[in-house]
Amino acid sequence: MDIFYLGTGASEGWPALFCQCSACAKARELGGKNLRSRTSVQIDGEYKFDVPPDTYHHVLTHGLNLSNIKHLIVTHCHGDHYYWQELQHRSAPFAHIYDDTGLDVYGDVWVEELADWERLARGGIRFNLIEANSSYDVGDARLHAFQANHFIDKGALIYVFEKDGISLLYGNDTGFFYEEVWDRLKDFKLDVVSLDCTHGEDDVWNNHMGIPAILETRSRMLKEGIAHDETIFVATHFSHNGRLLHHELEEVLNPQGFVVAYDGMRLAVSKGK
């Protein structure tokens, strides 16, 4: 499984659009892995989690061809993860896609409610309703949806994505998992766990997470057999309000068994690795 982190920042990006804080100033000065666009991940060139407002930036920066994406999985309807208006550019005259089999979008009722699906259908886009505590065939993959601890009024989802014998938990945006989610995760043996670390070292457990919460998540997964000794744990979705720059996050998290994601990071995961 090829897991391509296109963006690793929170809603405002890092450096944030209008911000003068020291964390943003330092990120502008250092550049490189400290520059974080809005979060999205691509898998095996055909699957994508979320469509943020930085999608065109991702296309240019990472040399993507989004016509190859067949399945778009949406975590929730917040604009930094679901800028649905960008999908309008999949239809003519904005795009000319040959031998097109269409694009399937997966999301909850709030994702469905927000977009103009009649208009998007002109670009071969189809909506598939996803509900928490349910499982779905998504191309050659299997998708399992769970309720995220985030955006309580309208809901958000986290996912286990299974393909070619590899299980990935895509866990942002969310705080520490609900107990009913922990119970359901006992049915899995995860190979990759990607977690929200919006708040850096701050002790935040609801809506998003900080380092204390993701460390406890890793510890509990290993203790309960949800993860194994070779499971890759990834921290992503960082905000400037968490203050820690990339090298500072690595100093804290690498010794604790976490990879710190950055824009453009790729993980090649195969069974037994």
Image (tube, rainbow, N blue to C red):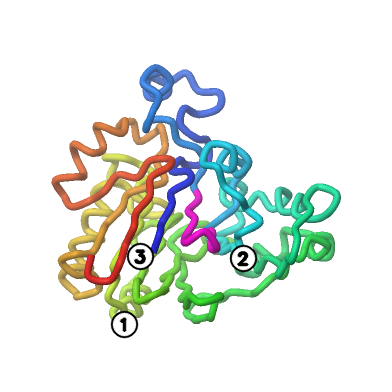
Image quarter of residue 267? bottom left
Name the spot of residue 41 as percent of width and height, x first: 48, 53
The tag earlier along the polypeptide, 2 or 3, is 2
Identify residue type, mark 1.
Asp
| Residue 30, horizontal then vertical, whole percent | 36, 21
Helix, strand or loop at mark 1: loop
**Which residue bears the numbered disc 1?**
187
Q: In the visual, does 1 lie left or right of 272?
A: right
Q: Please tell me how crowded label 2 is: few (under 14), some (14-19), or many (20+) other residues with Cα within 10 Å.
A: some
Residue in the picture at 31% in, 40% down: 200
Query: Which mark identifies residue 217?
Result: none
Tell me the kind of residue under disc 3. Phe
State the mark number for residue 70: 2
Among the 4 quarters of the image, the one containing residue 59: top right
Residue 113 place in picture, x, y as percent: 72, 64
Asked whether residue 115 is drawn in magenta, I would say no
* Magenta highlight range: 40-48
| Mark-to-mark CA distance, 2 and 3 | 29 Å
For the residues bearing labels 1 and 3, Cβ distance under 8 angstroms? no
User: Closer to us: mark 2 or mark 1?
Assistant: 2
Q: Which mark is first along the chain, 1 or 2?
A: 2
Q: Taken as a whole, is the magenta stretch helix, strand or loop? A: strand
Residue that label 3 marks = 177
Task: Identify residue type, mark 2.
Answer: Lys
User: Percent x, y for residue 95?
Assistant: 78, 51
Q: Residue at x 57, y 61 (%)?
A: 74
Quadrant location of the C terminus in the rendered image = bottom left
Cα gap from disc 2 to disc 1, whole angstroms: 28 Å
Q: Is residue 221 left or right of residue 43?
A: left
